[in-house]
Image (cartoon, rainbow, N blue to C red):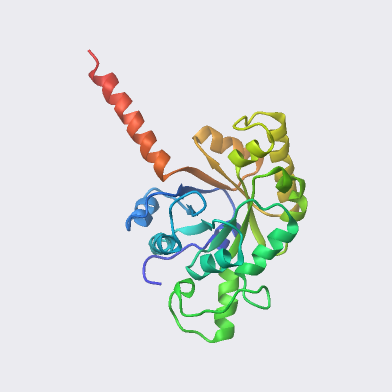
Amino acid sequence: MAGRAMSGFRDLVAADGLKLGTYIGEFATPGIGDILAATGCEFVFVDMEHSGFTFETAAQVLRNLHGAGLATMLRVPSGSQENLQRAADIGAQGVIVPMVGSAAEAARSVAGIKYPPEGRRGVALGLAHDDYRAAPVADALAAANAKTGLVALIETAEGVAACEDIAATAGLDAIWIGHLDLSTSLGCPGAFDDPAFTGAVDRIMAAAQAAGVPVGRLVGSAEEAAAVHAQGCKLVAYLGDIWLLQKALRDGFAAIRAATAT
């Protein structure tokens, strides 16, 4: 596609070292890709599950991000075949499936975003996912399979119980830990120092390490980012569009009030 060189999601997870990104669930402005790229952002977690984004909106956001050279992951509303295929067709490089609770579910999700013989995705070419370019069919299918990845979101007690099998699923590119849902599912909502939560995270990290699969987390501070990186997380998303704006304004207003206090 036109624009600067793009770092794909699968290239990102295959590369060494910590990868830093952020979350988008509100701001679909055309400039968002360049705004984020100017900060050194490497990837973006685009959310459809907990936002008002339709597939049309998500397609526009992905295009803006890709044009700025950023890798993308799109969280679909659910792991249905319709959602998986539409996410892949609009160009999501990594498709995040929420509430993955078993290896069978992870395997179905991989199949949903891959063309035969690796999966069962319906064939549609010359669309956003292949930058509207014509190519021999066999080549186009192989290229799509090579660049489209699957991320399993483990955020339930069921997912933790099956995390070793989920991590070992063929075709899985990464695991994302949904910390809020996970703590709630474990009966300790928001208590991230509770042994039930910390033990679950340790088990997920060990399973991912054994399978050679990178892990991602959303964090709210540099200190938290350092802590989850020390645990083994490679993909770290720092806050998100809503919270970053609020934080910047809150901090700025507090500084102004302090500076003008009499």
Where does residue 25 sit, x and y in percent of width and height? Answer: 44, 49
Indicate the position of residue 122 as horizontal and vertical percent values. 58, 77
Could you say where residue 258 lies in the image, as x and y percent from the top left? Answer: 29, 19
Query: Residue at left 60%, top 68%?
Result: 113
Q: Is residue 139 above or below residue 241?
A: below
Q: Quadrant of the C terminus?
A: top left
Q: Residue furthest bottom?
A: 136
Q: Quadrant of the N terminus?
A: bottom left
Query: Residue 201, position in %: x, y?
Result: 69, 40
In the rendered view, does 98 fall on the left or right side of 160? left
Nearer-the-camera pick, 136 or 116: 116
In the rendered image, the vertical position of residue 100 relative to residue 128, given as above or below: above
Answer with the quarter of the image where residue 230 lies. top right
Tell me the quarter of the picture where residue 137 sits.
bottom right
At 61% from the left and 41% from the top, the residue drawn is 181
Q: How many marks?
A: 0
